[in-house]
Structures are given as C-alpha cells and as structure tokens.
Image (cartoon, grey):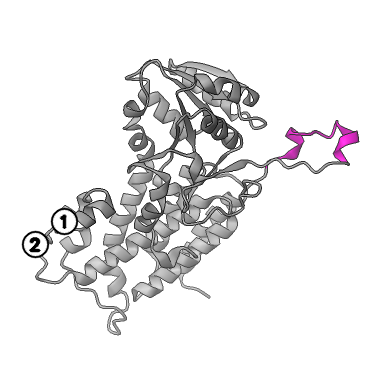
Amino acid sequence: MGTAPEIANQRIVEALVSKLRRRQVVGSRQTAIETVLVLRQVISKARFSNIEHLIQIIKAVGRRLVQAQPKEHTVGNTVRKVLHHVREEYHAVSRAGPSSAQPPKSSFSISKFVSQGQPRKQNLTLPKSEARSTSLRENDPDDPDSFAKGLKPVLMEAIQDVLDELETVYDNVSKSARDHIHSDEIVLTIGHSKTVESFLKSASHYRNYTVIVAESAPSFGGHKMARSLSTAGISTFLVPDSSIYALMSRVNKCILGAHAILANGGMFAVTGSLLAVSAAQAHSTPVVVCAGQFKLTPLWNLYHEYGALDFADPSSVLGFEEGSLVDKVDVVNPYFDYVGPELINVYITNDGDHPPSSVYRLIKESYDDEDHEL
C-alpha cells in the first residue's frame, strides 16, 4: 500500500490519463496546460529526499501520460520542459551558498552571442533559487523531508513560469504579426489553427489585407477559420483544396500552423499543408509557420511515409454507401501531413523568428539530452 500523497497523486494522474484516452482534452496548448497542472500537483504532494528520486517520480508520471495518448507530442514535451526547469533550479540551489548575495557577473563573448542569438534576459538577473541562500541536504537521516521542503517553493515558481508561457503563447507569437504581413497582401492558410487565427487577427489591427482559407477536406476546419476571420472584419475567401495551386500565383505569403515541430526542422501539420507548401515552392512563395515553442519535439521525421501520427475516419472519404468500391480498396485518411524543412522558410515562435536549420538548437536549449526518451 502506498502513502496518502502517493495515492492522491495516482488519482490525479489517472484522471488526466482517462481524459487523454477519451479525447476529452483536445488541442496541443490545452493538453500542455493540463499536463503542467498535473505535474505541479504531483510535485507539491510528492515525498522525496534527493533529486534523483524526484526526477524518477516525474518521469514515471510522464511515461504514463505519453502512453495514454502517444499521438499528442505536447504531453512529452511539457514533461521534458518541467524536468529541465527542475534540474536548473536544483543546480542553482546547489551552487548557492551563504556568500551568494551578489548577482553573478555576466560574461559575453562573440562566440556566445552567435551561438545563443542574443544574451538571455535571465542571465543578467539573479535566478530565483540563487536569490534564496538555502542550503539543502540530500538524504538527511534526521529529517528526510527537509530536502523536499527546501526545494518545493522554488520548483513551484519555475513551474508557474512554464504555465505563464503557455497561457500567453498566442499573444507572444502574434507580437511580430505587423512585421510579417503588409498592406494589400494576399495571405493563404489552410484548416483551423488557433495560433494562426490569433496571428492574423493581430495583424488586422495595423494592416488591410486579404486571407484565402483552404477548407482542408474532409475535416473542413477551414470553415471555422473563415467564419472567425470574417467576423473579425478581415477580407476572407473560403476555397476548396483543389484550387490552391491555381490561386498560388496571386498569393504573397503562405501562413500555416503546426501540430509538432521535429528536430530536423520539419513539422507535422493538418492534411493539405503539404499540398499548399509544394504549390508555394513551385511559385517561390514564402512559407511561414506560427507555433509555440512547446511544440518543439526531439524526434527526427518519424512516420513520414503517411505523414502521420493519426488517422481520421475513412468513411468521410469513401462512405459505406459506395458498397461496390468499399470491399475493393483500402482507404487511408491521415489527419496530418509531414512537411520537410526544405519547404519552410521561417518559424515564428513565442521566442522570436527562427529558420528550420536552427530548430535543433532551440530543442537543445529547451530540453536535457537525457530526457529525450522518457
């Protein structure tokens, strides 16, 4: 029998596992937020006497959640992000001693500037954990809970940072919208992406432009997107997917959303995205992808033969009323396309704009190498 906190943690985790299996939690961002909230509760109630024990607890929860819905990569990404923050705060506390009253001197060099892109803001300020000159003792026989009591307040703040980043991701991605969309441009998008919707609406405050929305059959997510943009006062045209190539010569920019961004700079996106970017490449039209950094996944173009991670109901492509054909063919209806890095010009994230070639560096900064396999 486990202790009361362990049983409580199990119930919390199993509740989210059940929701993930039944698809009651839908959408990458919402799934990531639910995962962070569960991890926060697990850590706050967990009993541990050293950092290895805590990491094992978080990884065990992560594995359970990933197995419940392996096609939703943001679950694993969020667990990796939290593990990265846990280690970072622990090392900062370990380095902090009674003499750590002054902020560390910032040393910048040309090589650091090139490798990091720009000096990080947090490098100039004192980390939360270093601001508290707390000395932690692991495996203390006199007080086994002293390590957890000293570390938990710092971890709660770090997890809150992850949660704040997820809650403000649409606003942060949309900040640069006015720099990418110009007046009288024609922009093409496909299906419905909340990130792209927020990006286009933000740009409409400063620019007058036209959006062509491909309907993304057979899911027809483009209908919802077109209604939303039209309601916001943006000039919007809804077109069938078959018209994309014919219209591409008039399009100035192709803006897409992503389900997951892979380590090689490619991505999984809604079906029809590969059609759109292939047409864009033929017409030398730039392709811009809007996505939060929580979608960065340390995988390498797996499953790209069918584009996919997920398959939708084949009856929407070929119904049972076509009785003479159903028995003679196998109908595949992939929900996602795999789009290679050579077809994408730039990723717009909540941490700035990045070419596909630098995605591996972002993943290196966001996650620890030992967490790639949970």
Residue 313 counted in the magenta span: yes
Tell me if I can see residue 24 in this picture: yes
> Is 19 or 63 nearer to us in this picture?
63
> Is 92 or 240 nearer to us in this picture?
240
N-terminal-most mark, 2 or 1: 2
Q: Residue furthest right?
A: 324
- The 10 Å Cα crowd at callout 1, few under 14, some 14 to 19, many 20 or more, is few
From the top left corner, tell me how far across and down residue 52 is, in percent.
38, 74
Label of residue 178 in the image = none
Report the magenta residues as a range: 312-327
Q: In the rendered image, which residue does mark 1 sit on?
A: 108
Tell me if I can see residue 227 in this picture: no
Q: Distance between the Cα atoms at labels 2 and 1?
A: 18 Å
Q: Amino acid at mark 1?
A: Phe
From the top left corner, tell me how far across and down residue 19 is, in percent.
57, 49
Q: Is residue 323 above or below residue 231?
A: below
> Is 300 or 246 nearer to us in this picture?
246
- The 10 Å Cα crowd at callout 2, few under 14, some 14 to 19, many 20 or more, is few
From the top left corner, tell me how far across and down residue 68 is, in percent.
59, 56
Locate residue 65 relative to residue 366 in the image: left or right.
right
Residue drawn 40% across the image and 46% down it = 293
Q: Amino acid at mark 2?
A: Gln
Q: Residue furthest bottom?
A: 141
Q: Is residue 74 above or below residue 93?
A: above
- In front of the other: label 2 or label 1? 1
Q: In the rendered image, which residue does mark 2 sit on?
A: 102
Residue drawn 50% across the image and 65% down it = 373
- Residue 190, by quadrant, is top right
Q: Secondary structure at mark 1?
A: loop
Q: Secondary structure at mark 2?
A: loop
> Is 118 or 64 nearer to us in this picture?
118
